[in-house]
Image (cartoon, rainbow, N blue to C red):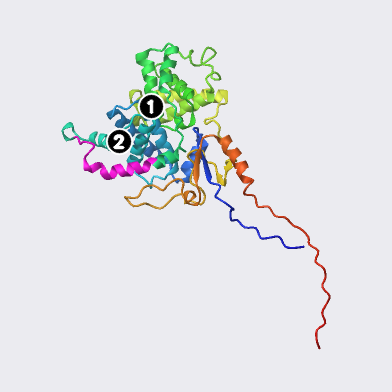
């Protein structure tokens, strides 16, 4: 029997490429995995998150940008931070790059110099205001433009964004709540919601219902239009009480521990939020509602692997062959690309449809299977030759 030919790992033909699948929803368990992978502790994470969102909010108000640009910028900022350790970047650079990218996506175009100039003028008196053409912004502007690509990679080039503010106003009006009190409070609560990770976890209807309910509880209004038999039909809105409860508790965590960094938290005593949290915890216990939806105590690994690379949830950590936490960078060096070494070994493509990626993987695998065949060959025995003496 002839020996089988040795198997080789060399691919025949072009590289099958890597695929990144972007998903707009990232649950709490995945968020904790990403933060743990980059070595981010809870205290440091809270500080960087709140400072970055506050910077984006202040600059967008100074530039009179619409709220949809704020929503998109904050989501991109959150996703970028889940990929890159805080040792790789300054939160101001990341926030500026997120706002710069969001201005393009939401068609509210602003130059990077204009964003940096607006942020700088917030710290100066009107007589000392600078213009965007000042040479002082030249170097910083180039670094912001360089970070724009990393922002898009971190989000998986997914431009699908959620804007719950309009639904908050409509829901408050349909429930008959006063415009100047409950509706206004619900709108501000919705802005504070983006200081948490709730926009990454929940849909538009879930966020809107949670904001209106929290505003109604703050003003001690009648909750029957929202909760109870005559309340909102969650199935019709594509959500559930568990998801709304998780969003409410995320907001109360923010108002309890970081009141000074919010808009609504400073207007009410902390006892109000503590009592409200006790009430919601009692409801959760009575209805057997978990603190986080879609949460498992056993770690799960993504079952989808497309063209040789494990799918990430839009913002997953870098591949195993890429260092998870690169060393400290020099002041002029930006963060490492999330693509890492994969971009050098083959093409990295970004897709939105997971089903299409699975189908493509099955099709491509047929051309890269190493098949071996064993066969027997009969060789006639040659007559034994006599050695000369």
Q: Residue at x 32, y 50 (%)?
A: 332
Q: CA distance from mark 2 to mark 1?
A: 18 Å
Q: Earlier in the sequence, mark 2 or mark 1?
A: 1
From the top left corner, tell me how far across and down residue 61 is, in percent.
Answer: 30, 28
Q: Report the front residue among 319 and 142.
A: 142
Residue hosting label 2: 111
Does the magenta run of residues contain 146? yes
Residue nearest the viewer, comparing 319 with 296: 319
Specify whether residue 43 is painted magenta. no
| Secondary structure at numbered mark 2 | loop
Q: What is the chief secondary structure element of the magenta stretch?
A: helix
Q: Magenta residues? A: 129-148
| Side (left or right) of 303 relative to 151 | right
Lateral position of residue 328 relative to residue 304, left or right: left
- Secondary structure, mark 1, is helix
Vertical side of 12 occupied by 127: above or below:
above
Q: Residue at x 57, y 45 (%)?
A: 307
Image position, residue 163 (x, y; %): 42, 25
Q: Nearer the viewer, residue 161 or 256?
A: 161
Tell me if mark 1 has few (under 14), some (14-19) or many (20+) residues whose alpha carbon lies within 10 angstroms of its own: some
- The residue at the point 62 percent across, 49 percent down is 368
Q: Quadrant of the N terminus?
A: bottom right
Q: Which residue is mark 1?
A: 68
- Quadrant of the frame with the C terminus: bottom right
């Amino acid at each position: 029997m002839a020996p089988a030919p040795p198997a080789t790992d060399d691919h025949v033909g072009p590289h099958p490429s890597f695929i990144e699948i972007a998903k707009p929803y990232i649950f709490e368990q995945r968020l904790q995995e990403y933060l743990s992978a980059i070595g981010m502790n809870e205290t440091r994470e809270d500080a960087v998150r709140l400072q970055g969102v506050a910077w984006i909010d202040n600059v967008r108000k100074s530039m009179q940008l619409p709220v949809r640009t704020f929503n998109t910028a904050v989501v991109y900022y959150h996703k970028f931070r889940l990929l890159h350790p805080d040792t790789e970047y300054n939160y101001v650079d990341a926030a500026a790059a997120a706002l710069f990218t969001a201005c393009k996506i939401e068609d509210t175009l602003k130059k990077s110099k204009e964003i940096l100039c607006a942020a700088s003028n917030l710290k100066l008196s009107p007589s000392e205001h600078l213009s965007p053409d000042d040479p002082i912004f030249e170097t910083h502007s180039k670094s912001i433009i360089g970070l724009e690509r990393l922002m898009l990679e971190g989000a998986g080039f997914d431009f699908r964004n959620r804007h719950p503010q309009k639904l908050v106003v409509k829901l408050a009006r349909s429930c008959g709540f006063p415009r100047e009190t409950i509706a206004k409070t619900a709108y501000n609560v919705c802005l504070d919601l983006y200081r948490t990770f709730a926009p990454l976890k929940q849909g538009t209807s879930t966020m809107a219902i949670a904001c209106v309910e929290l505003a109604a509880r703050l003003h001690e209004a009648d909750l029957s239009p929202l909760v109870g038999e005559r309340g909102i039909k969650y199935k019709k809105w594509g959500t559930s009480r568990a998801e709304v409860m998780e969003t409410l508790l995320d907001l109360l965590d923010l108002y309890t521990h970081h009141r000074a960094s919010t808009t609504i938290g400073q207007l009410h005593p902390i006892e109000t939020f503590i009592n409200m949290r006790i009430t919601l915890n009692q409801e959760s216990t009575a209805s057997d509602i978990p603190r986080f939806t879609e949460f498992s105590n056993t770690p799960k690994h993504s079952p989808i692997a497309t063209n040789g690379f494990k799918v990430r949830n839009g913002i997953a950590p870098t591949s195993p062959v890429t260092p998870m936490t690169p060393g400290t960078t020099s002041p002029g060096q930006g963060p490492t690309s999330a693509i890492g070494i994969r971009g050098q070994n083959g093409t990295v493509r970004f897709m939105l449809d997971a089903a299409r990626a699975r189908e493509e993987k099955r099709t491509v695998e047929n051309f890269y299977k190493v098949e071996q065949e064993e066969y027997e060959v009969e060789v006639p025995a040659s007559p034994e030759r006599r050695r000369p003496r």
